[in-house]
Image: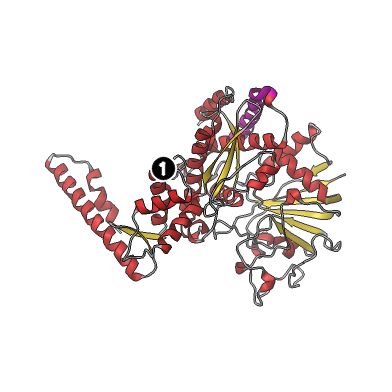
Amino acid sequence: MDNILRNAREKFEKITLTDNYRSKKFTKNFDKHLAILVDTTIQLAEENSVLTNKHIDFTDKMYWESQGYILEKLDTITDSEILNEFDNLEDILYERIKVSLGNAYNGSEALNLMIDNSVHDTLLALKFNFFENKDNYFNPWEDAKNILVEDEVLYTFSTDTEKLNSLGFSIVSNDSVDISDKKINIIGKGSRNDYNYGFVRDLLGLRNTIIQILDENSSFGNKATTADEIIIKLRRMGIRSNELTDHNIKSWLIAPLKRSNRIGSDKEGYFILNNCQDVKISYYSHYENFKGYYRTLEKHRKLAIKFGCEDPYFSSHLEFLKP
Amino acid sequence: MPVLDINKNEIIYHDDFPNNKQIRHLEVGASINCFGKKFYPACYLTDKEQPAFPHFYEKLDYDETNSHFLDFVGDFYNLKIDRDFDLAIFCNPYGFGFRGKENSKKFLNKSGQVLRNGGEILVLGNSANAWSKYRNAEKWLSQLQSEGNLDYNLQLLPLTTIDENHHYRTNHTFRKVVVTETTIVNEMYKIVKIN
């Protein structure tokens, strides 16, 4: 553990900000950070998260509450030596960032808030390594930390464009009304005087948009909508592939809806689970897949026996099925 | 069942924010809780966002689980009022507090602005919440004060650890918005505005 802190100190003492920053990289990292933050909240809260069962758009407050909730559940650090070292690392980060900004440090509230945010997310990414149950989760702050450490920019974000504009940023939106409120603006700043901004889509809002698409298509158990049809509709609403690739839509939007039981699927596509019949159709489809996987795993187990492999690993599927 | 305050009076809605000078307490970021109205009666509850719950006074038979209790919706930092309060309450705050130096400065200066001399900031929270954590309050208040970065002279009082038997925990459910679980509030402290 000492090594983790020592390595962090060495890295933080060398932190610099770049003078060549484009929004693509830091928005991508923020997007990944947000997806893991939301999904970790849902994972920790199981059935108790409103992030899965209410038709809501994501707000700053939800972001902070999600972050607070994860920390409340996982932060187990009480060792005062470690906590003191985190205080020292915090001071180092503040100092290094100001040095790296040089003349671009204007002391404004907006810039100082960006520094606060970047410093804290970087420290949280490090702190996560000291949480007892860290192995059960992805580190929600790893990608946020990379905005400072790898992309070498400071950042802040908000779902509230007015708030950002009141801080002195000038955010312009050209979205259709269907999705204009489902975005989160991210401001990045390196060592130049100016800043750059991009945005990511509000994943929760977009997941609800997918539910609406299925609803409009009357997609229930007897009439599925394919992933391609969903993607086409989202593209028509203005979501470009450089913001969310087809793969991102499948893994960040559709798959979490399936995992949280909000939609079901069969080989034809996806549909809303509204009654016993819908659940039965989805169940049947997954059961057929399950049988296929089971037979394949059994064949592997038997082949392993034939080859004389005595590794119990090959019975993992049988262990998994034990009540 | 109506919610009662510590004096066993039914809590009420105040539609006159911020003008009623008899109301000396202000809770900021109150969300769907009603901590201030319960434990510090004569309290305005405020938040930046309207929670997705009906307001309690709209319901004849309201209870804590299906209502919100706000008297005013607006951003604390943009609040312009021509009066002061005795107490500003922050109950497990998110988005304002001690998460970093500038956030702390902004929070302390704005809180100082809405308090009379001798008035207090009351912060309650979970020890993992960076916005309310005592350790952070201690660090940033002392640093900002020594650098002359605060508009007011403020004094941090010692931490009170709130255990499960504390009357706040036995008589109140600290609810969240993103999850239906409750928050375990285990830290409480005050900051006094000297002048």
Q: Is residue B40 above or below residue A26?
A: below
Q: Which residue matches tag 1?
A: A245
| Residue type beneath disc 1 | Thr
**First to last magenta residue range:** A81-103
Residue A85 among magenta residues: yes
Nearer to us in this view, B74 or A193: A193
Q: Name the quadrant of the N terminus of chain B.
A: bottom right
Name, please, the residue furthest toward the left.
Answer: A306
Point out residue B16 in the picture as x, y percentages from the top left corner. 80, 64
Mark 1: secondary structure: loop
Q: Please tell me which residue is depicted at 57% across the width and 38% down the height of the picture.
A: A121
- Quadrant location of residue A16? top right
Please report the residue visible at 88 percent of the width from the left and 44 percent of the height from the top: B195
Report x, y in % for residue A4.
Answer: 51, 30
- The residue nearer to you, when weighing B130 against B77, is B77
Q: In the rendered image of this protein, does residue B33 appear above or below residue B128?
A: below
**Which residue: 47% across, 51% down?**
A237
Q: In the rendered view, tell whether residue B6 sits above or below residue B103.
A: below
Percent across and percent down for residue B36 are 73, 61
* Residue A285 horizontal/vertical position (percent): 27, 60
What is the residue that sits farthest to the bottom in this orientation?
A: B60
Relative to A309, is A55 on the left or the right?
right
**To which quarter of the image does residue B49 belong?**
bottom right
In the picture shown, does residue A215 fall above or below A318? Answer: below
In this rendered view, identify the residue nearer to me: B97 or A194: A194
* Residue at (25, 43) in percent of width and height: A313
Q: Residues within 10 Å of mark 1 (few under 14, many from 20)?
A: few
Query: Which chain is disc 1 placed on?
Result: A
Q: Is residue A36 magenta?
A: no
- How would you classify the magenta stretch by its main secondary structure? helix
Q: Is residue A129 at least partly visible in the picture?
A: no
- Please indicate, yes or no, whether residue B179 appears anywhere in the rendered image: yes
